[in-house]
Image (cartoon, helix red, strand yellow):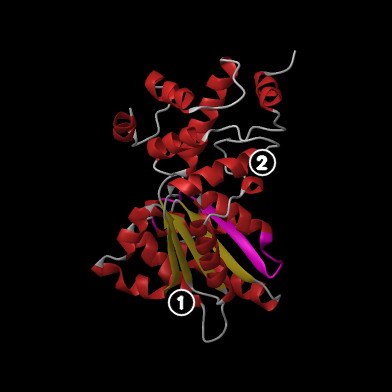
């Protein structure tokens, strides 16, 4: 007997699950907002911006964009990805070194670690490569950590760009950078874009796109169902995925071949869709 997901996919004529919560570049959907965001990412890299800043709500698709970007980078960039880095400046530098695959002995003093870091950057540059440090969930970095990152960019001199920083985080990151005491850091930000939620027509296209990538040959969601999904999720991709997946489960359980508005409403009424921060929206659409 096949697994539940095999049966689920077979019932709807799908090759794979269309609404997984895990970021997957294969399902990349190019909404206007995502195109603008990706353009700013490319702009920051091509212009060798010291710091590029991308912000957006939780689940807006920032990590998926990052993963897509990582697929396209050439051999002239050495990339280090740092997620949820915390701690003092010494710990931050160790996070950076480990992300780049370089030694980061806990017993080594900060000054020596920084000297090693600078030497490695110069060595990479001599071999025709720049170093790109990507900080995901960068809203968790405190002021001293951000100031340390600004100091990292001082390693660059004149036209020699050894290091670029890409900071990706929730809207709080933008608020931190715009504080009066962060002026010096803000002046190093050469490219910035805020990834907003999708509007209702975009949500409909988003749902159709993911279904098509997963192998669907028909429109599995009615327009009314998609409209209710938008209302309940606010157009946040991760929440859209979660609610769509639950709606497909409910439709499968009821032996229905399409998801209608009543199916989505039943998911909401049963309280199985938590949809972080959207409870008020759910009450309003009932």
Q: 148 or 207, which lies in front?
A: 207
The residue most toward the bottom is 158
Q: Is residue 131 above or below residue 64?
A: below
Residue 195: give x, y in percent of width and height: 44, 56
Which residue corresponds to mark 2?
212
Residue at disc 2, secondary structure:
helix
Q: Is residue 83 above or below residue 222?
A: below
Mark 1 neighbour class, 10 Å CA radius: few under 14, some 14 to 19, many 20 or more: few
Residues rendered magenta in the picture: 72-88
Q: CA distance from mark 2 to mark 1?
A: 47 Å
Mark count: 2
Mark 2 neighbour class, 10 Å CA radius: few under 14, some 14 to 19, many 20 or more: some
Name the residue: 52% across, 87% down.
Answer: 158
**Would you say residue 21 sits in the magenta stretch?**
no
Name the residue: 32% across, 31% down.
Answer: 279
Q: Earlier in the sequence, mark 2 or mark 1?
A: 1
**Would you say residue 82 sits in the magenta stretch?**
yes
Name the residue: 46% across, 27% down.
Answer: 264
Residue at disc 1, secondary structure:
helix
């Amino acid at each position: 007997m096949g697994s539940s997901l095999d049966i689920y996919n077979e019932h709807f004529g799908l090759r794979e699950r269309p609404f997984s919560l895990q970021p997957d570049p294969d399902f990349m959907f190019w909404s206007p907002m995502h195109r603008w965001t990706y353009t700013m990412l490319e702009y920051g890299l091509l212009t060798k911006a010291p710091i590029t800043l991308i912000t957006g709500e939780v689940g807006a698709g920032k990590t998926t964009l990052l993963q897509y970007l990582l697929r396209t980078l050439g051999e002239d960039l050495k990339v280090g990805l740092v997620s949820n880095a915390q701690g003092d400046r010494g710990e931050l530098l160790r996070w950076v070194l480990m992300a780049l695959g370089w030694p980061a002995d806990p017993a080594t003093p900060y000054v020596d670690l920084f000297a090693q870091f600078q030497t490695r950057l110069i060595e990479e540059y001599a071999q025709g490569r720049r170093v790109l440090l990507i900080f995901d969930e960068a809203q968790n970095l405190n002021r001293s950590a951000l100031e340390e990152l600004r100091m990292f960019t001082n390693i660059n001199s004149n036209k020699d760009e050894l290091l670029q920083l890409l900071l990706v985080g929730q809207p709080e990151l933008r608020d931190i950078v715009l504080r009066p005491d962060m002026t010096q850091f803000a002046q190093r930000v050469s490219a910035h874009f805020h990834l907003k939620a999708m509007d209702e027509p975009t949500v409909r296209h988003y749902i159709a796109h993911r279904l098509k990538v997963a192998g669907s040959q028909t429109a599995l969601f009615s327009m009314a169902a998609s409209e209710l999904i938008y209302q309940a999720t606010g157009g946040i991709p991760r929440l859209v995925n979660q609610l769509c997946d639950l709606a497909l489960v409910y439709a499968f359980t009821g032996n229905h071949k399409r998801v209608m508005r009543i199916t989505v409403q039943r998911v909401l009424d049963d309280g199985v869709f938590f949809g972080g921060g959207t409870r008020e929206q759910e009450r309003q659409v009932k």
